[in-house]
Amino acid sequence: MSKRQISITRTIATTPEKIFELLADPAQHPLIDGSGTVRAARDGGPHRLALGAKFGMDMKMGAPYKIQNTVVEFEENRLIAWRHFNGHRWRWALEPSGDGGTEVTETFDWSTARFPFLIDISFFPKKNKQGIERSLERLDRMFPA
């Protein structure tokens, strides 16, 4: 794993298919976002994501802003990742855990960013690690054992 990635894995008590349905629907992203920045899916985007899909989100970090994303990795019920304008990625990998649950790994990957050194020196790696922890906690609460 690159030093320009932060990943956290948690076992969630449901199937990969159910989790993937949430991840593939941009309108559901505010429900699982632990960063507190994702507000709503922008009108005009797809209702279900696929490889190459572009979707916009209303965001807020201090001030409101809009962001455009592109799905750059996609394997039905197993993997989905989208990149922002700077090229960094948010990746979700799902692996059945064998007990009816799913090992969910969320990754913030800035190794693919246009200017990764700017992210290196920013607060984003630490802030995003905290957001990932909270996202996985939220997801876990959505599917209690």
Image: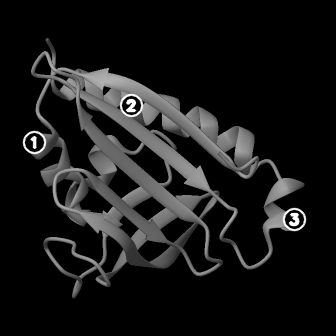
| Residue 56: % across, % down | 37, 78
Query: Local crowd at mark 1 within 10 Å, few (<14), some, or many (≥20)?
Result: few
* Residue in the picture at 30% in, 55% down: 79
Q: Quadrant of the C terminus?
A: top left
Q: Secondary structure at mark 3?
A: helix
Of marks 1 and 3, which one's residue comes earlier in the chain? 1
What residue would you read off at disc 2? 136
| Residue 35: % across, % down | 52, 43
* Residue in the picture at 32% in, 64% down: 40
Please, what is the three-letter code of the amino acid marked with disc 2?
A: Leu
What residue would you read off at disc 3? 117
* Residue in the picture at 73% in, 79% down: 114
What residue would you read off at disc 1? 18
Please, what is the three-letter code of the amino acid marked with disc 1?
A: Lys
Q: Quadrant of the N terminus?
A: top right
* Residue in the picture at 34% in, 35% down: 104
Q: Measure the alpha-carbon separation of dots 1 and 3.
A: 36 Å
Of marks 3 and 2, which one's residue comes earlier in the chain? 3
Colour scheme = one colour
Please, what is the three-letter code of the amino acid marked with disc 3?
A: Phe
Q: Secondary structure at mark 2?
A: helix
Residue ranking furthest to the top? 145
Q: Secondary structure at mark 1?
A: helix
Q: Measure the alpha-carbon separation of dots 1 and 2.
A: 14 Å
| 19 with respect to 80 (left or right) | left
